Image (spheres, coloured by chain):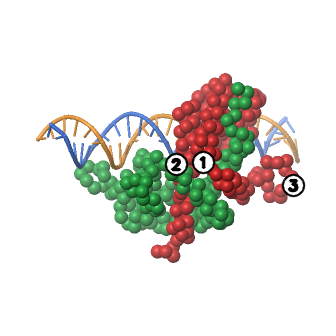
Chain colours: A red, B green, C orange, D blue
Amino acid sequence: MTETRSLEPEEWEFWDTWMRAQRLLTRELERGLQRACDISKAEFSVLVTLWQAAGREMRVGELSESLDWDKSRVSHQLTRMEKRGFVKRTQYGADGRRAGIGLTAEGRRAAQSAVLVHGGNIRRHFLDSLTPEQASVIRAWSEQAVDSLDPHRGETAGDDAVRQGAER
Amino acid sequence: MTETRSLEPEEWEFWDTWMRAQRLLTRELERGLQRACDISKAEFSVLVTLWQAAGREMRVGELSESLDWDKSRVSHQLTRMEKRGFVKRTQYGADGRRAGIGLTAEGRRAAQSAVLVHGGNIRRHFLDSLTPEQASVIRAWSEQAVDSLDPHRGETAGDDAVRQGAER
DNA sequence: ACTCTAGAGTTGATGTGTCAACTCCTGTGG
DNA sequence: CCACAGGAGTTGACACATCAACTCTAGAGT
């Protein structure tokens, strides 16, 4: 019985609590955004990314890169958001591929208010709950986790050294 | 109103990095489980919970409580897992409501191997990456976050008197 | 006994995420 | 010029998650 366990009970509990905290927090933020702005976290991400592009249209590939989402995920999401009237695909090129993605007026409005609301919620539910020590530990862990898990490391700063295996 | 930002850029970056770390970690674990055992995280949770009941059948409500999932989520998940042959609903009572949920032999097998694999992955990708100090800080934050966000706090005992409830 | 209601569980609709297969375009080599 | 490899984007199928509406049952209260 005990020998089949790869983690101690106390480690499992740590893991459970950690996961649970994350889930509760994300759920809370998701609901806050939903109630206040009627948009989802996924929609928020897309809106903000496009908004930061300051009016310029983006390609699906850029969005995909910038959000670190699968291209197909982006495409599905855009389809839904187009239906809701937040974004538009403006075709250029002969046939219909090669679309540029832009915010509609409504998309811009939503993005703007959502940033305020969501930022405030993040502060209330997360940032304000951290002691400075907790903040720095969590920040450090996050960075180290991203470093060790992200398959395409190294696009952050101007690519200081050519990384050998870092193709995408 | 030009500065519509409610968080400083550096705070946004902190938040983004943290979310990103979580996503990468969960994705990694999900894939590990998928590759090694061909089961999903959701399936894992159900299998383990039922396994810990040591053969006793559980009700949907118990599962729902124990996993902290919506009842409907549990029901849907059970439907899928019943189709895969991991669990069975054994009706009792006159008509068909009031089902008891139990693992099939295959479910038991899957649970057992998955616990080993998943536990090992958690250790490798998470626990081993933490210094003792980081671990204790993160543990503390998790607990406090769960306390402040969990809507049904304190069902362990009647009230706030009894802390320390490693029960569920 | 009979109704009424609260709880357990299911179902359907819709949104989210992932994988694999597909289409269309474009650039390159023959 | 043509074929074709490869990239960009879409689509379909399926699992997961959430909300609201529904069905049954059992247990009051009268």
Please tell me which residue lies in front, B154 or B28.
B154
Discs 2, 1 touching: Cβ within 8 Å:
yes
Badge 1: chain ID: A
Please tell me whether mark 3 or mark 1 is closer to you in this view: 1
Residue B85 visible to an observer of this rendering: no
Q: Which residue is painted at 36% across and 58% down in the image?
A: B58
| Residue B39 left/right relative to B132 | left
Please tell me which residue lies in front, A91 or B61.
B61
The amino acid beneath tag 2 is Ser
The amino acid beneath tag 3 is Ala
At which x and y percent is residue A62? Answer: 75, 39
Quadrant into which the C terminus of chain B falls: bottom left
Between the C-alphas of marks 2 and 1, the distance is: 9 Å
The tag on residue A161 is 3
Q: Residues within 10 Å of mark 1 (few under 14, many from 20)?
A: some
Please tell me which residue lies in front, A143 or B38.
A143
Same chain, labels 3 and 1: yes
Residue tagged by mark 1? A129
Please determine whether, in this image, residue D19 is positioned above or below residue A88. below
Between the C-alphas of marks 3 and 2, the distance is: 44 Å
Please tell me which residue lies in front, A128 or B139.
A128
Q: Which residue is painted at 53% across and 33% down in the image?
A: A35
Discs 3, 1 touching: Cβ within 8 Å:
no
Report which quarter residue A37 is drawn in: top right
At which x and y percent is residue A105? Answer: 67, 23
Between the C-alphas of marks 3 and 1, the distance is: 38 Å
Q: Residues within 10 Å of mark 3 (few under 14, many from 20)?
A: few
Report which quarter residue D12 is drawn in: top right
The tag on residue A83 is none
